[in-house]
Image: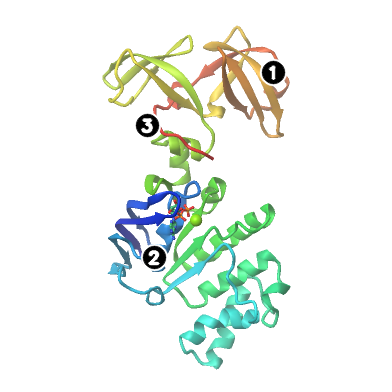
């Protein structure tokens, strides 16, 4: 398998309404051989444009694209040996499934004797053995997307690119098809770039995730890294849920920060040096890292305003001094302990209080 490198790539569009749009703004990225890397971010953040520059459908204004250490920036798409799967399948409606999958092989001038068994093998791989003579409109959305996948892999591409391939499928089929894509990508050991705006899909399918925001990379990491060690407010809010709590910094000494959250003083280790004493800031805590106790315990008081039982977990909204805070409990015994409008004690674990670069996110 090959690696892919994007070196300082940028692309600006002139948009009719928005004017000049920096769709991709100085993106640097290396995708390892055999890796599945996902570009994740809200609509309009530049995911598709980045992918299209890897494919060769779009030329960067600046920067270089390397595939397997070869500079392909000036190569046409058809010289890059890439398989591409789109959201809308893009099958030829008037061609049979066999003809759809065989298309790329005919372009390569393979003989019929080679094409027939190759198409048959690939259809078997995607679970569509025997579908050769059907037409796209006779297949379900999930089956059509598997034909699109077959068509992408039949040419033995060096790289597979996916642009929101599951968006047209219902929830159950999305989960099934994404694990099929992942299984095949791993089995064939093809380097892949996958685009989605769905954080759960990204977490499920990827080796690493690139979180993008307004044409730039916010953070790159495995799902666990982005979840437990987000570097920015944007990443913390895009991957999972997080509470914003007002805090007051008392002292910062030798990387230990003393700060007050509501009425309690916490000592944070390895605190960022850019924070100054006697200032206000926001800190961030995920709902499952906030513990509820009886009212006479914990660090400060609150009142339960909402309680949603979801089986393996219970989600609470707790009012703390006028702030609405989300708390998630996975403790089955707590299910019976806390009721609506009940006073509770609240405890935070200082290791899970984050100080992050500010930034807004619209989900
Ligand atoms: P995403 O795939 O993350 O939703 P895109 O890469 O499609 O984002 O778009 C990034 C930005 O570039 C958006 O603001 C979009 O409107 C703009 N854009 C994309 N393609 C074009 C184009 N062909 N002409 C004008 N603007 C474009
Ligand atoms: Mg897109």
- Could you say which quadrant of the image residue 71 lies in? bottom left
Find disc 2 in the rendering and name its residue: 58
Asked if 351 appears above or below 140 in the picture, the reply is above
Quarter of the image with the N terminus is: bottom left
Q: Secondary structure at mark 2?
A: loop
Q: Residue at x 35, y 57 (%)?
A: 11
**Residue at the disc numbered 3:** 357
SS at badge 1: loop
Q: Quadrant of residue 247?
A: top left
Crowding at mark 1 (Cα within 10 Å: few <14, some 14-19, many 20+): some
**Which numbered disc flags the more N-terminal residue, 1 or 2?**
2
Give the label, 2 or 3, closer to the camera: 2
Q: Choose between 132 and 16: the one closer to the eye.
A: 16
| Dot 1 and dot 2 residues touching (CB under 8 Å) | no
Give the camera-side residue of 66 and 359.
359
Separation of marks 1 and 2 at Cα, in angstroms: 56 Å
Classify mark 3: residues with Cα within 10 Å, few (<14), some (14-19) or many (20+).
few
Residue receiving disc 1: 338
Asked if ligand 1 lies within 8 A of label 1, the reply is: no
């Amino acid at each position: 398998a090959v690696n892919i490198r994007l070196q300082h790539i940028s692309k600006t569009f002139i948009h009719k309404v928005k004017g000049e749009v920096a769709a991709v703004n100085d993106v640097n990225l290396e995708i390892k051989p055999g890796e599945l890397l996902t570009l994740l971010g809200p609509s309009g953040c530049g995911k598709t444009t980045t992918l299209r520059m890897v494919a060769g459908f779009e030329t960067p204004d600046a920067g270089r694209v390397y595939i397997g250490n070869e500079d392909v920036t000036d190569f046409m798409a058809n010289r890059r040996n890439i398989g591409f799967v789109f959201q809308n399948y893009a099958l030829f409606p008037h061609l049979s499934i066999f003809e759809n999958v065989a298309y790329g092989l005919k372009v390569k001038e393979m003989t019929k004797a080679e094409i027939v068994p190759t198409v048959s093998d690939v259809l078997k791989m995607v679970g569509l053995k025997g579908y050769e003579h059907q037409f796209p409109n006779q297949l379900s959305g999930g089956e059509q997307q598997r034909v699109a996948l077959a068509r992408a892999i039949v040419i033995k591409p060096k790289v597979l690119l996916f642009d929101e391939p599951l968006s047209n499928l219902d929830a159950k089929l999305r989960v099934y098809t994404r694990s099929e894509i992942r299984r095949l990508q791993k089995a064939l050991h093809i380097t892949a770039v996958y685009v989605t705006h769905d954080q759960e899909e990204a977490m499920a399918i990827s080796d690493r995730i690139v979180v993008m925001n307004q044409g730039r990379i916010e953070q790159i990491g495995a799902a666990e890294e982005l979840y437990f060690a987000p570097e920015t407010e944007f990443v913390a809010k895009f991957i999972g849920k997080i509470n914003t709590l007002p805090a007051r910094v008392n002292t910062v000494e030798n990387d230990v920060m003393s700060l007050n959250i509501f009425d309690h003083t916490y000592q944070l280790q390895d605190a960022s040096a850019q924070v100054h004493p006697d200032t206000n800031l926001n800190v961030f805590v995920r709902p499952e890292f906030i513990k509820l106790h009886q009212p006479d315990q914990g660090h400060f008081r609150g009142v339960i305003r909402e309680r949603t039982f979801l089986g393996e977990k219970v989600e609470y909204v707790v009012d703390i001094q006028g702030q609405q805070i989300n708390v998630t409990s996975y403790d089955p015994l707590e299910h019976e302990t806390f009721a609506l409008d009940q006073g509770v004690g609240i405890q935070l674990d200082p290791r899970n209080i984050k100080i992050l670069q500010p930034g807004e996110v619209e989900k």
